Image: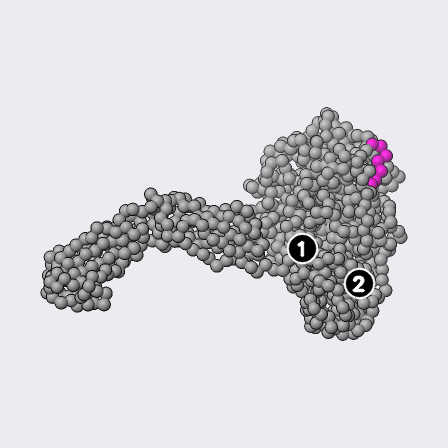
């Protein structure tokens, strides 16, 4: 799916190919099920929105857009919680938040004096047009339309297009801004409901004057509703409530040729609204530009009202619709992606995959979400939000919901996902407030139950087993998305997935009504093979079956971590009751990965002496895939760590470059900058996608400017003084230096009178080397010291030599002294 290809932000469509669409639009895949067709290929939006975005708490949201990494939301609200549950701030009509973090952008708390109804990105990066019913922004006069710079947080001073009436929609193309709404003039120049202005200055285009006249809407509102421009820049599509455009009768939808000067209305025309009112509330064009969809409401009367209607973009006079979807109540909002047509509004029902064409009958009684059985053959329950198959207009198995009272008023397909708004407080169990973002990155695992075969021990009325695997999690019986058995001993529900799959989790959704009995003391069984008994005491001992027992009453949602393969999943009560389930989700996913990756260091060779910069490299492996190799480099002489900017300082982890990122086997490499000569230790650990980390491995090496270190250290004797006479014991001391680091100072002490040597046990005897104590072991400069035991009086000679890590030895330094 490519959600960025179509949104009200871009208003880009295509005319070519619409003739082919007419031939192919109704080639529908055969589907079965109670509540919806299988999702189209590539369908990726989750059915639960993010829970970390700002929460507008009052009014309604009418507009949304994404500009770069910013999400903008507009409407009639006056109060916003920066995050769910935080103290609300006073912020009216427009706010912005970070797409990645969800954090409210406090640098863009602009002050408007009226609602925002449309937000459209400008051609310039980080700039945006807004339209609505405002007159000032941060004290700057901008009537109904303005251009904002999101980097500076200010109104763009060069763009001025003052409108005397509401601006409902904006499209940007070819250096122009097209606008529609309920205005009669722009910058004092007469323009009725439709205008074009310069995108930089706002100057009204003199060669675009196509008034929308004779309002024929069923209820009050702007005469112009929605507009879109084709990608070749040649055609403007106008979706409206006028009878005429430029004096030509084009009820509901018109096509305008903007490739020449002056602009002119084309021959495209539908006669759908001839002799009746137009109730269009929204309109969108498909990403491939082959079809458009309009929606409206205010009275269940298909095809004109409470419907979504698709038309081909190509055509001439008497262009007919492609399909009509009856939603049984007002349909305020539309959005179209590559894979679905999204609708929002005041409705609770829409057409399922088995609904009759052109629409099902009979109509239901008035009122939103009536508490009664299914309202028409083939209708499915969808509470204010639904997704339709673009080929048929029938519902697909994407079943979010909201508690909106008036309804969902805007749906925008943006790069981040699906951005909706209305007057809701809750969206799919998340307290979102008036705006919700279904993030494409949160699509989550596949629900295997949707494609499985569901059965149950018995069936109460028409509440068949399939209704617990239809994608709908509504908890009330009238929605007909619930399965139920008759009251019986140990009733069960089961899904056959058709093949063995990796199962990560089973999620049980309880009903919200008590008439079915309590979901309590529940067995969950998973097996690769069929269950051989309906007695849970037998099933739990069946070979290859994994069992979970959920004691006591279960809540609305119960999650069971599975982490195994399975084809058969059974849910069974332990007592005597009716088993009622709103939904059982069987989520695909491999068992949790708990195996840590491993890595080895190939270069540098252990204890090698090499020039700088240093190439640190090796290989790493994992049972799934290596995602990172972390390197730490420490200077053993100074205790400092290599940092990413090439300096030595406080500790820092560095990321190696992987030859095959995410591969089960990969090479890795980290190239250091030039580092000072000295002794170093590198620490390495590999990380996988599950966050498993190996235990660090390490290797020592020495950096020397010329590679191999051949320079011997230099040690000098400070005490005792040459030819001095001193008491015993004797403190022999001095200093030593080396280009890399002194690792040892060797001391030899000989009694010149007896020819014996001092040994480490304090006796005099055969020759022995003794190790002095270093003040800074491995340092390029260090003190050294050796304290003798009590020695006999006599003449002595001491010999010392410094040693470095490369084994270089200095020529011995000799000093004579006498012990008194």
Judged by depth in the image, the label closer to the viewer, 2 or 1, is 2
- Left or right of 293? Residue 561 is left
Asked if disc 2 and disc 1 are in contact, CB closer than 8 Å, the reply is no
Mark 2 falls on what kind of element?
Answer: strand
Q: Of the two numbered discs 2 and 1 on the same chain, state the one appearing first in sequence.
A: 1
Q: 373 above or below 543?
A: above
| Residue 272 counted in the magenta span | no
Q: Is residue 684 among the parts visible in the rendering? A: yes
- Residue 192 horizontal/vertical position (percent): 76, 34
Badge 1: how crowded within 10 Å, few (<14), some, or many (20+)?
some
Residue tagged by mark 1?
445
Q: How many marks?
A: 2
* Residue drawn at point x = 69 percent, y = 55 percent: 446
Find residue 455 and name its label: 2
Q: Judge by depth and name the residue closer to the eye, 101 or 305.
A: 101
Callout 1: SS: loop
- The residue under the point 49% across, 54% down is 599
Q: CA distance from mark 2 to mark 1?
A: 23 Å
Quadrant containing the C terminus is bottom left
Q: Is residue 531 left or right of residue 710?
A: right
| Nearer to us in this view, 673 or 68 | 673
Quarter of the picture holding the N terminus: top right
Q: List x then y, in percent, for residue 302.
A: 86, 46
Where is residue 699 drawn, in percent x and y? Answer: 41, 54
Magenta part mainly helix, strand or loop?
loop
User: Which residue is painted at 15% across and 58% down in the image?
Assistant: 797
Residue 734 percent coordinates (x, y): 21, 56
Q: Which stretch appears magenta?
A: 316-322
Q: Is residue 543 above or below residue 257?
A: below
- Colouring chosen for the image of the structure: one colour
């Amino acid at each position: 799916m490519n959600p960025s290809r179509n949104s009200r932000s871009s208003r880009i469509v295509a005319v070519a190919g619409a003739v082919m669409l007419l031939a192919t639009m109704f080639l529908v895949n055969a589907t079965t099920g109670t509540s919806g067709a299988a999702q189209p290929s590539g369908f990726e939006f989750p059915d639960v929105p993010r829970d970390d975005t700002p929460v507008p708490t009052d009014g309604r949201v009418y507009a949304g857009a994404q500009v770069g990494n910013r999400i903008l939301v507009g409407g009639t609200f006056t109060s916003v919680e920066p995050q769910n549950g935080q103290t609300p701030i006073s912020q009216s009509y427009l706010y912005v938040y970070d797409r990645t973090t969800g954090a409210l952008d406090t640098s863009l708390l602009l002050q408007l004096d009226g609602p925002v109804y449309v937000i459209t990105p400008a051609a310039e990066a980080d700039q945006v047009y807004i339209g609505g019913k405002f007159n000032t922004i941060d004290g700057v006069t901008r009537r109904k339309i303005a251009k904002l710079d999101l980097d500076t947080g200010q109104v763009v001073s060069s763009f001025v297009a003052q409108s005397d009436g509401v601006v409902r929609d904006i499209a940007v193309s070819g250096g122009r801004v097209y606008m529609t709404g309920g205005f009669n003039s722009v910058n004092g120049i007469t323009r009725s409901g439709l205008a074009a202005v310069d995108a930089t200055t706002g100057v009204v285009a003199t060669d675009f004057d196509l008034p929308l006249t004779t309002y024929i809407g069923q209820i009050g509102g702007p005469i112009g509703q929605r507009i879109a421009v084709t990608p070749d820049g040649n055609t403007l599509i106008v979706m409206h409530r006028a009878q005429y455009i430029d004096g030509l009768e084009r009820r509901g939808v018109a096509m305008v040729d903007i490739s020449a000067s002056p602009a002119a209305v084309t021959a495209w025309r539908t006669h759908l609204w001839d002799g009746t009112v137009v109730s269009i509330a929204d309109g969108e064009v498909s990403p491939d530009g082959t079809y458009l969809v309009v929606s409206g409401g205010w009275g269940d009367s298909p095809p004109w009202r409470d419907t979504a209607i698709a038309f081909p973009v190509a055509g001439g006079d008497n262009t007919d619709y492609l399909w009509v979807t009856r939603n049984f109540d007002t349909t305020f909002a539309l959005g179209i992606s590559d894979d679905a047509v999204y609708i929002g509004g005041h409705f609770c029902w829409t057409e399922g995959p088995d609904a009759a064409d052109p629409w099902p009958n009979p109509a239901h009684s008035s009122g939103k979400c009536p508490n009664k059985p299914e309202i028409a053959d083939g209708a499915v329950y969808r509470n204010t939000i639904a997704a339709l198959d673009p080929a048929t207009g029938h519902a697909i198995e994407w079943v979010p919901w909201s508690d909106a009272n008036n309804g969902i008023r805007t749906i925008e397909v943006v790069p981040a996902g699906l951005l909706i708004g209305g007057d809701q407080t809750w969206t799919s169990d998340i307290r979102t407030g008036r705006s919700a973002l279904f993030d494409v990155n949160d699509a989550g695992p596949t629900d295997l139950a949707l494609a499985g075969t569901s059965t149950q021990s018995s069936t109460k009325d028409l509440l068949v087993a399939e209704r617990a695997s239809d994608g709908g999690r509504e908890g009330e019986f009238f929605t007909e998305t619930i399965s139920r058995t008759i009251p019986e001993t140990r009733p069960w529900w089961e899904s056959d997935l058709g093949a063995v799959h990796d199962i990560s989790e089973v999620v049980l959704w309880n009903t919200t009504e008590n008439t079915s009995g309590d979901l309590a003391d529940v067995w969950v069984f998973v097996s690769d093979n069929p269950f051989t008994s309906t007695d849970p005491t037998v099933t739990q001992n069946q070979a290859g079956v994994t069992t979970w027992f959920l004691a006591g009453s279960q809540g609305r949602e119960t999650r069971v971590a599975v982490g195994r393969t399975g084809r058969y999943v059974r849910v069974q009560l332990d007592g005597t009751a009716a088993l009622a389930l709103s939904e059982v989700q069987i989520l695909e996913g491999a068992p949790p990965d708990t195996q840590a990756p491993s890595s080895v260091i190939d270069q540098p060779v252990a204890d090698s002496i090499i020039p700088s910069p240093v190439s640190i490299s090796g290989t790493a492996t994992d049972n799934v895939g290596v995602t990172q190799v972390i390197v730490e480099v420490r200077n053993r002489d100074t205790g400092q760590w290599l940092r990413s900017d090439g300096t030595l300082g406080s500790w820092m982890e560095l990321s190696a470059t992987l030859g095959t990122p995410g591969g089960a086997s990969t090479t890795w490499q980290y190239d250091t900058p030039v580092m000072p000569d000295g002794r170093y230790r590198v620490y390495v650990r590999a990380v996988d996608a599950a966050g498993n980390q190996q235990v660090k491995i390490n290797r020592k090496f020495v950096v020397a400017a010329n590679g191999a270190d051949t320079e011997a250290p230099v040690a000098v004797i400070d005490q005792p003084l040459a030819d001095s006479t001193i008491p015993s014991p004797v403190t022999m001391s001095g200093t030593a230096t080396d280009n890399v680091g002194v690792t040892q100072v060797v001391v030899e002490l000989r009694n010149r009178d007896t020819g014996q040597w001092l040994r480490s046990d304090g006796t005099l005897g055969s020759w022995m080397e003794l190790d002095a104590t270093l003040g800074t072991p491995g340092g390029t400069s260090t003190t050294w010291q050796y304290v003798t035991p009590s020695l006999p009086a006599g003449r002595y000679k001491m010999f010392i030599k410094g040693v470095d890590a490369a084994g270089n030895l200095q020529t011995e330094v000799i000093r004579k002294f006498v012990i008194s």
